[in-house]
Image: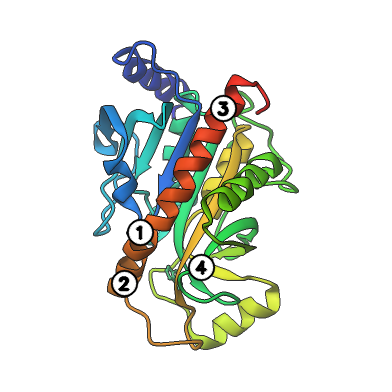
Amino acid sequence: MDYIKLKNTAKEILKKHPGFDPKTAIVLGSGLGSLSEEINVRGQIFYNEIEGMPVSTVDGHKGRFIFGNFMGVPLIIMDGRVHMYEGYEAATAALPIRMLYLFGVENIILTNASGGITYDSGTIMLVEDHISSFVSSPLVGPNDEMIGPRFPDMSNVYNKELSSLLCESAAATGVAVKKGIYCQLTGPNYETPAEVRMLKVLGADAVGMSTAIEAQLAVHCGMKVCALSCITNKAAGLGNPLSHEEVKIMGARMSGDLKRLLRDFIRKIGESYEDTIL
Ligand code: HPA
Protein backbone atom coordinates (compact mmCIF):
# COMPACT_ATOMS: atom_id res chain seq x y z
CA MET A 1 0.00 0.00 0.00
CA ASP A 2 1.37 3.40 -0.96
CA TYR A 3 0.51 5.43 2.13
CA ILE A 4 1.35 8.83 0.66
CA LYS A 5 -0.78 8.12 -2.40
CA LEU A 6 -3.69 6.98 -0.24
CA LYS A 7 -3.30 10.06 1.94
CA ASN A 8 -3.45 12.31 -1.12
CA THR A 9 -6.50 10.44 -2.38
CA ALA A 10 -8.22 11.00 0.98
CA LYS A 11 -7.36 14.71 0.76
CA GLU A 12 -8.72 14.97 -2.78
CA ILE A 13 -11.96 13.25 -1.80
CA LEU A 14 -12.48 15.49 1.24
CA LYS A 15 -11.79 18.60 -0.84
CA LYS A 16 -15.09 17.95 -2.58
CA HIS A 17 -16.84 18.29 0.78
CA PRO A 18 -15.63 21.59 2.24
CA GLY A 19 -16.36 22.03 5.93
CA PHE A 20 -17.00 18.32 6.41
CA ASP A 21 -14.82 17.16 9.30
CA PRO A 22 -15.89 13.67 10.36
CA LYS A 23 -14.39 12.43 13.61
CA THR A 24 -16.59 9.34 13.86
CA ALA A 25 -17.20 6.38 11.60
CA ILE A 26 -19.39 3.31 11.72
CA VAL A 27 -18.71 0.05 9.95
CA LEU A 28 -21.92 -1.78 9.17
CA GLY A 29 -21.98 -5.57 9.26
CA SER A 30 -24.12 -8.22 7.53
CA GLY A 31 -27.78 -7.24 7.32
CA LEU A 32 -27.17 -4.14 9.44
CA GLY A 33 -26.95 -1.76 6.49
CA SER A 34 -30.29 -0.03 7.00
CA LEU A 35 -28.72 2.65 9.19
CA SER A 36 -27.39 4.23 6.02
CA GLU A 37 -31.00 5.12 5.11
CA GLU A 38 -31.17 7.49 8.08
CA ILE A 39 -28.08 9.53 7.44
CA ASN A 40 -28.36 12.97 5.91
CA VAL A 41 -26.10 12.16 2.96
CA ARG A 42 -23.56 14.68 1.61
CA GLY A 43 -21.84 12.29 -0.73
CA GLN A 44 -20.52 8.81 -1.20
CA ILE A 45 -17.60 7.04 -2.76
CA PHE A 46 -17.48 3.39 -3.72
CA TYR A 47 -14.34 1.43 -2.83
CA ASN A 48 -13.80 0.58 -6.48
CA GLU A 49 -13.37 4.28 -7.23
CA ILE A 50 -10.30 4.36 -4.96
CA GLU A 51 -7.13 2.83 -6.35
CA GLY A 52 -5.74 0.04 -4.19
CA MET A 53 -8.92 -0.47 -2.20
CA PRO A 54 -10.31 -4.00 -2.03
CA VAL A 55 -13.77 -4.55 -3.47
CA SER A 56 -16.39 -6.45 -1.51
CA THR A 57 -18.19 -9.20 -3.35
CA VAL A 58 -20.63 -10.61 -0.79
CA ASP A 59 -24.35 -10.29 -1.22
CA GLY A 60 -25.63 -7.65 1.19
CA HIS A 61 -22.38 -5.68 1.23
CA LYS A 62 -22.32 -2.62 -0.94
CA GLY A 63 -18.76 -1.39 -0.43
CA ARG A 64 -18.90 2.37 -0.11
CA PHE A 65 -18.09 5.22 2.23
CA ILE A 66 -21.13 7.39 2.88
CA PHE A 67 -20.42 10.93 4.09
CA GLY A 68 -23.15 12.64 5.98
CA ASN A 69 -24.66 13.92 9.16
CA PHE A 70 -26.40 11.71 11.65
CA MET A 71 -28.04 13.23 14.73
CA GLY A 72 -26.22 16.43 13.78
CA VAL A 73 -22.83 14.70 13.96
CA PRO A 74 -20.58 14.54 10.88
CA LEU A 75 -20.09 10.87 10.21
CA ILE A 76 -18.71 8.37 7.74
CA ILE A 77 -20.58 5.13 7.30
CA MET A 78 -18.51 2.29 5.93
CA ASP A 79 -21.36 0.49 4.22
CA GLY A 80 -20.03 -2.96 3.43
CA ARG A 81 -16.75 -4.39 4.54
CA VAL A 82 -14.32 -6.69 2.83
CA HIS A 83 -13.66 -10.09 4.36
CA MET A 84 -10.64 -12.36 4.37
CA TYR A 85 -12.77 -15.21 3.03
CA GLU A 86 -13.10 -13.32 -0.23
CA GLY A 87 -9.44 -14.08 -0.74
CA TYR A 88 -7.88 -10.93 0.67
CA GLU A 89 -4.92 -10.79 3.04
CA ALA A 90 -5.78 -9.31 6.44
CA ALA A 91 -3.95 -6.06 5.58
CA THR A 92 -5.93 -5.61 2.37
CA ALA A 93 -9.26 -6.61 3.89
CA ALA A 94 -8.82 -4.01 6.63
CA LEU A 95 -7.44 -1.27 4.37
CA PRO A 96 -10.72 0.73 4.33
CA ILE A 97 -10.11 1.28 8.06
CA ARG A 98 -6.85 3.05 7.23
CA MET A 99 -8.76 5.12 4.73
CA LEU A 100 -11.10 6.22 7.52
CA TYR A 101 -8.06 7.26 9.52
CA LEU A 102 -6.83 9.30 6.56
CA PHE A 103 -10.24 10.95 6.34
CA GLY A 104 -9.53 12.19 9.88
CA VAL A 105 -11.69 9.74 11.82
CA GLU A 106 -10.77 9.36 15.50
CA ASN A 107 -13.61 7.18 16.83
CA ILE A 108 -14.66 4.05 15.06
CA ILE A 109 -17.71 1.93 15.81
CA LEU A 110 -17.49 -1.57 14.38
CA THR A 111 -20.61 -3.67 14.05
CA ASN A 112 -20.94 -7.26 12.98
CA ALA A 113 -23.16 -10.30 13.00
CA SER A 114 -21.94 -13.27 14.99
CA GLY A 115 -22.79 -16.68 16.32
CA GLY A 116 -23.49 -16.81 20.04
CA ILE A 117 -21.49 -19.18 22.22
CA THR A 118 -22.52 -17.78 25.59
CA TYR A 119 -25.45 -15.65 24.49
CA ASP A 120 -28.67 -16.33 22.60
CA SER A 121 -29.56 -14.98 19.20
CA GLY A 122 -31.03 -11.51 19.41
CA THR A 123 -28.40 -10.34 21.91
CA ILE A 124 -26.38 -7.20 21.23
CA MET A 125 -22.91 -7.80 22.66
CA LEU A 126 -20.49 -4.99 23.44
CA VAL A 127 -17.08 -6.39 22.57
CA GLU A 128 -14.72 -6.10 25.54
CA ASP A 129 -11.81 -7.91 23.94
CA HIS A 130 -11.13 -10.25 21.06
CA ILE A 131 -9.28 -13.38 20.04
CA SER A 132 -7.66 -12.92 16.64
CA SER A 133 -5.03 -15.65 16.87
CA PHE A 134 -6.73 -17.79 14.21
CA VAL A 135 -6.28 -15.15 11.51
CA SER A 136 -3.12 -13.37 10.49
CA SER A 137 -2.49 -9.83 11.67
CA PRO A 138 -3.22 -6.96 9.25
CA LEU A 139 0.08 -5.51 10.48
CA VAL A 140 2.20 -8.30 8.99
CA GLY A 141 4.60 -6.76 6.48
CA PRO A 142 6.68 -3.61 6.44
CA ASN A 143 5.64 -1.12 9.10
CA ASP A 144 5.14 2.54 8.33
CA GLU A 145 6.21 4.50 11.41
CA MET A 146 4.21 7.48 10.09
CA ILE A 147 1.07 5.46 10.81
CA GLY A 148 1.96 3.62 14.01
CA PRO A 149 4.53 1.56 15.91
CA ARG A 150 6.03 -1.74 14.77
CA PHE A 151 4.85 -3.52 17.91
CA PRO A 152 1.57 -1.93 18.97
CA ASP A 153 0.13 -2.70 22.38
CA MET A 154 -3.22 -4.51 22.30
CA SER A 155 -3.99 -4.36 26.04
CA ASN A 156 -6.90 -1.98 25.50
CA VAL A 157 -8.20 -2.47 21.98
CA TYR A 158 -11.76 -1.52 22.86
CA ASN A 159 -11.75 1.98 24.28
CA LYS A 160 -13.05 2.20 27.86
CA GLU A 161 -14.56 5.71 27.53
CA LEU A 162 -16.44 4.83 24.36
CA SER A 163 -17.65 1.56 25.89
CA SER A 164 -18.95 3.26 29.00
CA LEU A 165 -20.65 5.92 26.85
CA LEU A 166 -22.27 3.06 24.93
CA CYS A 167 -23.50 1.56 28.20
CA GLU A 168 -25.03 4.93 29.06
CA SER A 169 -26.82 4.85 25.71
CA ALA A 170 -28.05 1.33 26.45
CA ALA A 171 -29.51 2.55 29.75
CA ALA A 172 -31.01 5.66 28.15
CA THR A 173 -32.66 3.79 25.27
CA GLY A 174 -33.62 0.63 27.13
CA VAL A 175 -31.76 -1.52 24.59
CA ALA A 176 -30.19 -4.44 26.45
CA VAL A 177 -26.46 -4.91 25.89
CA LYS A 178 -24.30 -7.76 27.18
CA LYS A 179 -20.51 -7.70 27.32
CA GLY A 180 -18.20 -10.35 25.98
CA ILE A 181 -15.26 -11.64 24.00
CA TYR A 182 -15.44 -11.91 20.21
CA CYS A 183 -13.37 -14.36 18.23
CA GLN A 184 -12.60 -13.83 14.54
CA LEU A 185 -12.13 -16.83 12.22
CA THR A 186 -11.58 -16.58 8.47
CA GLY A 187 -14.81 -18.27 7.32
CA PRO A 188 -16.51 -18.52 4.88
CA ASN A 189 -17.73 -21.80 6.31
CA TYR A 190 -19.38 -21.61 9.67
CA GLU A 191 -17.71 -23.50 12.51
CA THR A 192 -18.12 -27.13 13.41
CA PRO A 193 -19.67 -27.92 16.80
CA ALA A 194 -16.24 -29.17 17.94
CA GLU A 195 -14.68 -25.83 17.01
CA VAL A 196 -17.40 -23.99 18.91
CA ARG A 197 -16.66 -26.13 21.99
CA MET A 198 -12.98 -25.25 21.58
CA LEU A 199 -13.78 -21.52 21.33
CA LYS A 200 -15.88 -21.76 24.49
CA VAL A 201 -12.90 -23.25 26.36
CA LEU A 202 -10.77 -20.39 25.04
CA GLY A 203 -13.15 -17.85 26.53
CA ALA A 204 -15.00 -16.62 23.43
CA ASP A 205 -18.61 -15.51 23.85
CA ALA A 206 -19.31 -14.97 20.15
CA VAL A 207 -17.70 -15.96 16.86
CA GLY A 208 -17.63 -14.20 13.52
CA MET A 209 -15.63 -13.47 10.40
CA SER A 210 -14.59 -9.83 10.77
CA THR A 211 -13.88 -6.96 13.14
CA ALA A 212 -10.77 -8.08 15.08
CA ILE A 213 -8.37 -7.27 12.23
CA GLU A 214 -10.11 -3.92 11.71
CA ALA A 215 -9.80 -3.15 15.42
CA GLN A 216 -6.09 -4.02 15.32
CA LEU A 217 -5.48 -1.72 12.38
CA ALA A 218 -7.50 1.06 14.00
CA VAL A 219 -5.58 0.80 17.28
CA HIS A 220 -2.29 0.79 15.37
CA CYS A 221 -3.05 4.21 13.90
CA GLY A 222 -4.36 5.58 17.19
CA MET A 223 -8.11 5.48 16.65
CA LYS A 224 -10.54 4.76 19.49
CA VAL A 225 -12.53 1.62 18.88
CA CYS A 226 -15.93 0.42 20.06
CA ALA A 227 -17.48 -2.77 18.69
CA LEU A 228 -21.00 -4.16 18.83
CA SER A 229 -21.75 -7.71 17.83
CA CYS A 230 -25.30 -8.65 16.89
CA ILE A 231 -25.71 -12.30 17.76
CA THR A 232 -27.89 -13.52 14.92
CA ASN A 233 -27.81 -17.24 15.75
CA LYS A 234 -26.56 -19.73 18.26
CA ALA A 235 -23.13 -20.94 17.14
CA ALA A 236 -22.94 -24.33 15.42
CA GLY A 237 -23.98 -27.28 17.56
CA LEU A 238 -25.79 -25.08 20.07
CA GLY A 239 -28.93 -24.50 18.02
CA ASN A 240 -30.27 -25.02 14.51
CA PRO A 241 -28.07 -25.58 11.43
CA LEU A 242 -26.79 -22.22 10.17
CA SER A 243 -27.55 -20.29 6.99
CA HIS A 244 -26.53 -16.87 5.70
CA GLU A 245 -30.20 -16.19 4.92
CA GLU A 246 -31.12 -16.58 8.58
CA VAL A 247 -28.18 -14.43 9.65
CA LYS A 248 -29.43 -11.65 7.36
CA ILE A 249 -33.04 -12.00 8.50
CA MET A 250 -32.08 -11.88 12.18
CA GLY A 251 -29.66 -9.00 11.49
CA ALA A 252 -32.49 -7.04 9.88
CA ARG A 253 -34.73 -7.86 12.83
CA MET A 254 -32.12 -6.60 15.29
CA SER A 255 -31.30 -3.48 13.31
CA GLY A 256 -34.17 -1.50 14.92
CA ASP A 257 -32.66 -1.89 18.41
CA LEU A 258 -29.17 -1.35 17.07
CA LYS A 259 -30.21 1.86 15.36
CA ARG A 260 -31.91 3.15 18.50
CA LEU A 261 -28.73 2.48 20.44
CA LEU A 262 -26.45 4.01 17.81
CA ARG A 263 -28.57 7.15 17.43
CA ASP A 264 -28.13 7.91 21.10
CA PHE A 265 -24.48 6.82 21.13
CA ILE A 266 -23.49 8.99 18.18
CA ARG A 267 -25.28 11.97 19.65
CA LYS A 268 -23.37 11.43 22.89
CA ILE A 269 -20.07 11.14 21.03
CA GLY A 270 -20.87 14.40 19.23
CA GLU A 271 -21.69 16.10 22.55
CA SER A 272 -18.51 14.82 24.17
CA TYR A 273 -16.59 16.38 21.29
CA GLU A 274 -18.21 19.68 22.08
CA ASP A 275 -17.15 19.23 25.71
CA THR A 276 -13.76 17.92 24.47
CA ILE A 277 -13.99 14.90 26.76
CA LEU A 278 -13.09 12.41 24.02
N1 HPA B 1 -20.22 -18.01 12.91
C1 HPA B 1 -19.42 -17.17 12.24
N2 HPA B 1 -19.84 -16.03 11.73
C2 HPA B 1 -21.13 -15.70 11.89
C3 HPA B 1 -22.03 -16.52 12.57
C4 HPA B 1 -21.54 -17.75 13.11
O1 HPA B 1 -22.27 -18.55 13.73
N3 HPA B 1 -23.24 -15.92 12.56
C5 HPA B 1 -23.07 -14.75 11.90
N4 HPA B 1 -21.79 -14.61 11.49
Q: Nearer the viewer, residue 230 or 275?
A: 275
Q: Residue at x 53, y 41 (%)?
A: 265
Between marks 3 and 4 in the image, the one whose residue lies nearer the viewer: 3
Q: Which quadrant of the figure contains the N terminus? A: top left
Q: Amino acid at mark 4?
A: Thr
- Indicate which disc, 2 or 3, sits on the residue closer to the N terminus: 2
Q: Nearer the viewer, residue 184 or 266?
A: 266
**Residue 2 at x, y = what percent?**
44, 27
CB-based contact (under 8 Å), mark 2 and mark 1: yes
Residue at which label 4 appears: 123
Residue at which label 3 appears: 271
Badge 4 element? loop
- Indicate which disc, 3 or 4, sits on the residue closer to the N terminus: 4
Q: Residue at x 64, y 47 (%)?
A: 163
Image quadrant where residue 145 sits: top right
- Indicate which disc, 4 or 1, sits on the residue closer to the N terminus: 1
**Residue 106 at x, y = what percent?**
56, 29
